[in-house]
């Protein structure tokens, strides 16, 4: 019977059964006694299964002893107990069919030696064949599935908000313009401006920076909703924490305030951590051993202890009292810089910190104005090592206050009439947040650069594959 | 205790419990005896819960008798058995708090009367508050969650392939160009062409039409993978089956041929159908009653019977023998037009049909050439009412054959060197397909236009919200 390596190692077959496994050679070792030990990996789990090939196999000399890393094979044989340590089962091969060879193994881009992550980005199509990137892919999948499962069992519906949008309303960042106009021969209006009325959508259009405003419309009909999709920033940021295209999860809850919002974020991160500990134990063990010693203990801390909640004003007091020298000055009213965020969660608290109630001047127009008239019901969850992984707020549900805030910051009512409608008709207190998937995966694995936790990263000047 | 309408109607609380429900008024009916019957919906399920308000409530005259559709309320009271038919429970209100009124109920865009779907598209931000669009949103969520659950339990990993791409390799359709260049002042090369080296990615870039080529790279490391994300076509198609932005699911399996591929597609559609029958029974009952009588029986058919599998050549024979007059001529070698597809699945077979082995001339370069040298291992799943909902193929895994096919159709090896690498290093037979989410939701609900099964549709000349 054909089984995945994961099923075989988990004991889904009995000793004595004939099993078939299909995958790629990780290593081959030949003994002097005329035996070859071939480790086969199929990506279903971190570990490979050991297949023992004796020299009486008919293709032993011609093929088996020539196998190199990532040759594709189909191996069949009897499942036996493994005498070696570490693994419980191995396969005594009765047949190994070579399905695909590796051309010029010496020049194979992901040959079995140490490669830097920078080099591996240049061969992003082959890097999932390495231990590191295979583990990242499985952890990323596990995190994503866990988020769907968690939100679904809490009664949330996944809503597919549009990626293409006509307005940069949120002001969350620079946008990519989208067009099908002939660039060599752009149509012009009488005034000499670009005539976007002739473009695909009949007006200027962009890639969205957030699905929030759209998902609020569904929140005010279905109570609990979320987005899970790609998001874009056309910012020229070459840092380890920024991508031009990244994935974001944005839950939105009706009849909820900022505390409900923070509680949801915490429950979600706890659920994800518990799932990773249970379902990706082998991958997490690898990260703990090779990338970041704290990888497993961090998940245990998240899943067991409550998050620190801190008012922005308190955070400022802590920063002012800190013995550390900061590059950027601290005073009430400033946005927190990365160094401040890291001080709070890494030095002061040592775990994720939820900072709440920021000055209105540094936050978006749609965030709910607090009674002090100075702060808004915003929150950021800061994680050691990566900084902000979640940003959220209670939304301004009062029509008059929202209009005043829009006027203050210069957002036109004309473009957002539909958004104001949500406050005209059956408005309710509601709140939500955005979780950056890459930052979360970076945080849980300890892999420092977000370019290494997304399959094909898009950054300024960089778009191979 | 606060509960969703779904939980209350499902019997999660006991008769005699005090429960609180938060939602929006669907209807209000006043009896002469001084009682008001307020139906409250929170989007958690199709049905509303009935709340009975007596005139001894302190805001009865001032507020409760003035409630109109979609006023937001929080109602608390004792859960009692419902004497009426249809529902088992209702709430005897001890308090109804009005959280958000509806401004000018007479001019409210989704007031409680019949609206056409065409009109409701113009108020897409409010249409989820109608029975039809609420049901569509829940069914769409259920389909999406079922797909993740099915693929996950079959051992597939979700891979987030990039949306931004540098090449139109697949030729699946017209693409949107993406740019951050100043359109009023475009940089030019010495030759007078647009100088895309100064653009964000240092070259011309587009929105992808498929994640397939990228996900193949992960397939050849992880064996079972899939994409689930938005996809784009800049085609000027104003039909009920086309969107400029739509969602697609693309599974890809290693060590698999076209039959494995068709079997996976069938298992997946069966699983989705069973989930819908179980989890969205109320929504599906609504579709069967109001939209398409066959909505439920269709799901039962899919989940219980096997799909028809038909060779392209056989399909052509059937079409040639058909008594029906076709607009487009039929002969071996032509692509099937919509009328042909509908004849096959609607008139000839009466259920989904998987057509296989199309002439190579009408299919993409990456599809595996059959031994007859005339056809490729491609398949389309055609569904009654909507036509193609799945398109897939076994991929050409042989380096030399793939190169020949690329040369034949004029795809440059230079841009796809990385894709050829997948055949140079450990290649294996593999196959996959793309499932259009909107067409599937349209098919299962009977809602005829894909614009009505996605929250905010993007079509030529159309990008509000």
Image (cartoon, coloured by chain):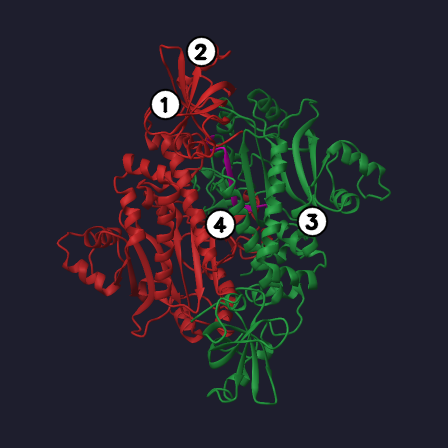
Chain colours: A red, B green
Q: Is residue A338 magenta?
A: no
Q: Nearer the viewer, residue A337 or B135?
A: B135
User: Which is closer to the viewer, label 2 or label 4?
Assistant: 2
Tell me what residue is drawn at x 62 percent, y 76 percent.
B84
Q: Residues within 10 Å of mark 1 (few under 14, many from 20)?
A: some
Q: Up-down: is A274 above or below A3?
A: below
Q: Give the dominant element type of the magenta stretch: helix, strand or loop.
A: strand
Residue hosting label 4? A177
Mark 1 or mark 2, earlier in chain: 2
Q: Say if mark 3 contacts mark 4, CB within 8 Å.
A: no
Q: Nearer the viewer, residue A207 or A65?
A: A65
Residue hosting label 1? A112
Magenta residues span B221-234
**Mark identifier at residue B301:** 3
SS state under label 4: strand
Q: Say if mark 2 contacts mark 3, CB within 8 Å.
A: no
Q: Could you say where residue B56 lies in the image, as x and y percent from the top left? A: 49, 89
Q: Could you say where residue B23 lies in the image, as x and y percent from the top left? A: 50, 71
**Considering the image in quadrants, where does the N terminus of chain B appear?**
bottom left
Q: Could you say where residue B331 lies in the image, as x and y percent from the top left? A: 80, 33
Q: Are marks 1 and 3 on the same chain?
A: no
**Mark identifier at residue A55:** 2
Task: For marks 3 and 4, give the CA distance.
Answer: 45 Å
Mark 2 belongs to which subunit? A
């Amino acid at each position: 019977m054909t089984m995945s390596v994961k099923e075989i190692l988990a004991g889904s077959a009995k000793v004595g059964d004939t099993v078939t496994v299909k995958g790629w050679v990780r290593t081959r070792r030949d003994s002097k006694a005329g035996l070859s030990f071939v480790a086969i990996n199929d990506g279903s789990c971190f570990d490979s299964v050991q297949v023992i090939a004796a020299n009486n196999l008919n293709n032993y000399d011609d093929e088996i002893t020539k196998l190199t890393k990532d040759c594709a094979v189909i191996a069949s044989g009897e499942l036996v107990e493994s005498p070696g340590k570490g693994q419980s089962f191995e396969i005594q091969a009765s047949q190994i069919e070579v399905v695909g060879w590796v051309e010029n193994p010496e020049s194979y881009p992901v040959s079995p030696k140490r490669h830097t992550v920078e080099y591996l980005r240049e061969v992003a199509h082959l890097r999932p064949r390495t231990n590191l990137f295979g583990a990242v892919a499985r952890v990323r999948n596990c995190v994503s599935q866990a988020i769907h499962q968690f939100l679904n069992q809490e009664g949330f519906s996944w809503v597919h908000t549009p990626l293409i949008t006509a307005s940069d309303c949120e002001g969350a960042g620079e946008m990519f313009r989208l067009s099908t106009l002939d660039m060599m021969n752009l149509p012009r209006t009488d005034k000499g401006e670009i005539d976007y009325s002739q473009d695909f959508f009949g007006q200027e259009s962009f890639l969205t920076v957030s699905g929030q405003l759209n998902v609020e419309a569904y929140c005010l009909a279905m109570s609990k909703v979320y987005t899970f999709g790609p998001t874009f920033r056309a910012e020229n940021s070459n840092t380890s924490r920024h991508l031009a295209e990244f994935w974001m999860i944005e839950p939105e809850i009706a009849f909820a305030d900022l505390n409900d919002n923070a509680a949801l974020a915490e429950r979600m991160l706890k659920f994800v951590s518990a799932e990773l500990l249970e379902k990706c134990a082998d991958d997490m063990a690898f990260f703990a051993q090779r990338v970041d010693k704290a990888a497993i203990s961090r998940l245990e801390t998240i899943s067991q202890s409550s998050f620190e909640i801190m008012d922005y004003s308190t955070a400022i007091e802590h920063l002012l009292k800190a013995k550390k020298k900061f590059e950027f000055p601290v005073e009430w009213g400033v946005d927190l810089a990365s160094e401040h965020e890291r001080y709070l969660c890494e030095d002061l608290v040592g775990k994720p910190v939820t900072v709440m109630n920021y000055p209105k001047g540094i936050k978006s127009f749609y965030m709910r104005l607090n009674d002090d008239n100075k702060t808004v019901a915003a929150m950021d969850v800061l994680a050691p090592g990566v900084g902000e992984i979640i940003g959220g707020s209670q939304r301004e549900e009062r029509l008059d206050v929202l209009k005043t805030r829009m006027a203050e910051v210069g957002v036109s009512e004309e473009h957002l009439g539909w958004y104001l409608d949500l406050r005209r008709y059956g408005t309710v207190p509601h709140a939500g947040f955005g979780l950056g998937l890459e930052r979360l995966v970076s945080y849980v694995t300890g892999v420092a650069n977000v370019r290494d936790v997304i399959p094909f990263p898009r950054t300024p000047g960089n778009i191979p594959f």
